[in-house]
Amino acid sequence: MSINASGWRPEAPVSGGKASPTVTGNKGLMLEEKLIFEIGDVETTGVDFERARPLQGRGWGGAVTGAGLGETSPTPSPSPEGEESADRLAGLFRDTPIGLPGLSEPETVRHYTRLSRQNYGIDLGFFPLGSCTMKHNPRLNEKMARLPGFADIHPLQPVDSVQGALGVIHELATWLITLTGMHGVAMSPKAGAHGELCGVLAIRAALEAKGEGHRKIILVPESAHGTNPATAAFAGYQVEDIPATAEGRVDTEALIARLGPDVAGVMITNPNTCGLFERDMRTISDAVHAAGGYVYCDGANFNAIVGRVRPGDLGIDAMHINLHKTFSTPHGGGGPGSGPVVLSEALAPFGPLPFVAKQADGHFALIEEETAGDDHPHAFGRMVAFHGQMGMFTRALTYILSHGADGLRQVAEDAVLNANYILRSLDDTLDAPFGASGPCMHEALFSDNGLATGFSTIDIAKGLIDEGFHPMTMYFPLVVHGAMLIEPTETESKAAIDQFVMALRSVAERAKAGDVSLKTAPHFAPRSRLDETLAARKPVLVWREPVLAQAAE
Amino acid sequence: MRYLPLTQPDRDAMLGVIGVATIDDLFVDVPEAARLDGPIHGLPMHASEMAVERHMTALARKNLTAGEAPFFLGCGAYKHHVPASVDHLIQRGEFLTAYTPYQPEIAQGTLQMLFEFQTQVARLLGTDVANASMYDGSTACWEAIGMARRITKRGKAILSSGLHPHYVSVAKTMAKFTGDLLETATPTLSAETDLATLIAAIDKDTSCVVVQYPDILGRIADLTPLADACHANKALLIAVVTEPVALGAIKAPGEMDADIVVGEGQSLGVGLQFGGPYVGLFGCKDKYVRQMPGRLCGETYDADGRRGYVLTLSTREQHIRREKATSNICTNSGLCALAFSIHMTLLGEKGLRTLAQINHAGAVAAAERLRKVAGVELVTPAFFNEFTLKLPVEARPVVRTLADRGILAGVSLGRLYPGEDGLANGLVVAVTETTSTEDVETLAAALEEILA
């Protein structure tokens, strides 16, 4: 049964041939690595400590200078009486084994280095994951984030002792507001989806303040990221789909027809997930406002228009910006992200706490629950402990300052140029469902239409792995069957893109011709296709000692 | 521009292939009124690496860092020594510049690491399972409350007065929109935790009780009676751990029968970073796995019978379930989870227990020294590496004065609970392996001088 409108379904993989012929399982530079639980033990540690003070109490006991302390030796007690202090653990000493294996430092470095080599990353090659924006991560960003003045400060230090950090937040906020043509920005959301939630909560707070809390519907296009409907539902709204037109854009007429006194707002991705600019955005915004609602824009694809278009000019009320997409902070195998939300004049008073305000004397103040008081009575509250993803702010600001206003505009232009180049280089081989709709923005979309019977997008993706590329986003957006969403970003050279086009053309031809070897690809990766059905049917989510694992069967 | 590989001849050739004359032709779908004709006015132009470094370094210098001061702040973020190899390894490009492992054949590095992380976290928290991380402790805490609502189909959560006030604020914000009822209270400067009060408050409408361990004042108490009381009413016990190093010394909440244990993992591997990014830990009992938020990594086999790892149980998640998902979370805190996991691997159980002992012993000694300052009382008799002092005067101005003298003395309860007169004299002091005897003496001497 298909559970996904795009045509994706889990399959049990087919073997492509014999397993490794070596006795180790290694193949040259491709090195296997066991789990830490299989190579480490609880008596090993890769950290040497300075001497600890001795303690009396259950668990520490007389053995404190032995098993409890490793190589350390007792030091004179700090208590003036010259006696050992008793512990203050209220009898809660953890006296059962925890089961955490340790490794020496060389073993640790080798373990994680070997694991790293089983990963594909942007540093290694082309990573055209549509909508995820895998662009080069400048190392200056990393260096700046690690300056002790940013990395080694506590979020609750007196604000006078962290003026430089608050200055970074304020400077980045100013850039984001100016680049988007908006009125304010909430910096604290931890990631894109968290930013979406921030924007929708601001909309809800604004409606409630107007006595319009009865509006319960949020309209979301079918092509939206899954986070959009999930966010709206989390914030207490019912989600209604907006249909798309044949050219891959929001059906403006249908959307306007649905507006009314029960609609709180719309969530529209622009540029959208089909890679197209929503031409009618301003018309839609005006209609939504006229009907008493607000416009949320999913800004995941802001990288396509930064420096060329300001969302504020399109009537947007709230938009999150993924700093890890547009502004190059690292994705790190799944985060951390950072999702500041720019807000219109109408929504800015309802944004969350805390935020940084620059005072007339140049001093930066942190506006929190305490200080919000009379000046910011409508703030909807706090979304997170402390003040947001500071480590991402320093990286994003570094990137922004490096590019400047002119460089950021060039970023959008090169990203769009690269995507259109891919679209037009491959639309003779692959079906481009919206190829006739005009230029794409930052990503090119193809479908699996025309592949041989039994072949699907996943076979092309796995074939690309063998060719040395990370596959494109597959089976998203849901509105296109077997979607392949290709986002090159601006940081690829023409030579890299040409090689990718050549490879994808070759793999696509094989899929159209029914080359069965594609069904068992990848053949040259650390693993062949993995059985996702098995993983979900009998979940093994933690490692257990073999005997225990067997007993649990 | 150093980050843009295309040359002008490249661009011209590509425009030719596309069949347009200029780059502007690719932006024709933007309404004319919204097209910008050049770089946005009032913003600086591109800058060299050296110029950017100079600008950022100047900003960094305006901050007083933890490493250059006697440092005693905690309350949800702790300064610990992170071995050099941790930061080296997380900067390997294959970890740093990888995406969420959607193509498992070429993401086994991240996936195996996540499987190891999940196991380490579950063992540390004493739970059956753990997920692949959340944004941070405060959002993990809120997600746990939402999860308890889904499991119990009840909407009233009781939050301990010892729960970090920011975590309470986050929960209150979310509850405003989801309609959950939260019972909250402000802590008092007393030796005892509020477990007895919590036990008395549980009823048949209670979805969960949320208790922090050690709590915001540093206090610890056996959670077992609270777990029993929750279970007698078919409510869940959610325990929140903001200092994971503590679990190298004191019983894990899972061992005391907590149903969901969440935490802030920042202490291991991540560093202070002015509050983020951090890493949310999330563990629970086996039977609740399918109600968990966030990504999960599971073991499986490939077509050739080799063991491997994939993201699994994704039918809980937004990209499949859309508005019916258990959470809207997508990105988690992968790189911080990696840092946590590497640090934990370096420590191992032996190292973690030693580290915990050094922290506790240092805190005990510091508490003994500081309580001897005239007028200062130690409020908390039982603690791990963080304790609360009651000063004879309001603590917040004292903290500010000491910061001006280059001493970061702790977190005043006035900062965390502004307007609560009963807490204004409270100062929460954290002591870790990075705190020297000299640091404690410096703080004690400065307090003696200021309070004299």
Image: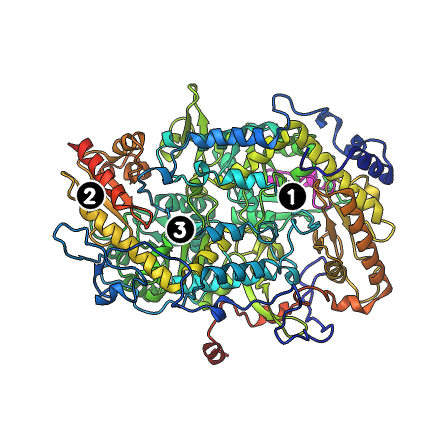
N-terminal of the pair, mark 2 or mark 3, is 3
The alpha-carbon separation of the residues under discs 1 and 3 comes to: 29 Å
- Tag 2's secondary structure? helix
Residue B306 visible within the image:
yes
Q: Residue at x 41, y 47 (%)?
A: B171
Q: Local crowd at mark 3 within 10 Å, few (<14), some, or many (≥20)?
A: many
Judging from the image, mark 3 belongs to the subunit labelled B
Left or right of residue A527, residue A186 in this image: left
Task: Point out residue A259 in the picture as x, y percentages from the top left corner.
Answer: 65, 39
Task: Point out residue A258 in the picture as x, y percentages from the top left corner.
Answer: 67, 41
The alpha-carbon separation of the residues under discs 2 and 3 comes to: 24 Å
- Amino acid tagged 2: Leu
- Tag 3's secondary structure? loop
Left or right of residue A368, residue A543 in this image: right
Tags 2 and 3 on a common chain: yes
Residue assigned mark 1 = A136
Residue B267 numbered tag: 3
Answer above or below: position of A293 versus B279: above
- Extent of the magenta region: A253-277
Q: Local crowd at mark 2 within 10 Å, few (<14), some, or many (≥20)?
A: many
Task: Point out residue A202 in the picture as x, y percentages from the top left corner.
Answer: 51, 37
- Amino acid tagged 1: His
Judging from the image, mark 1 belongs to the subunit labelled A
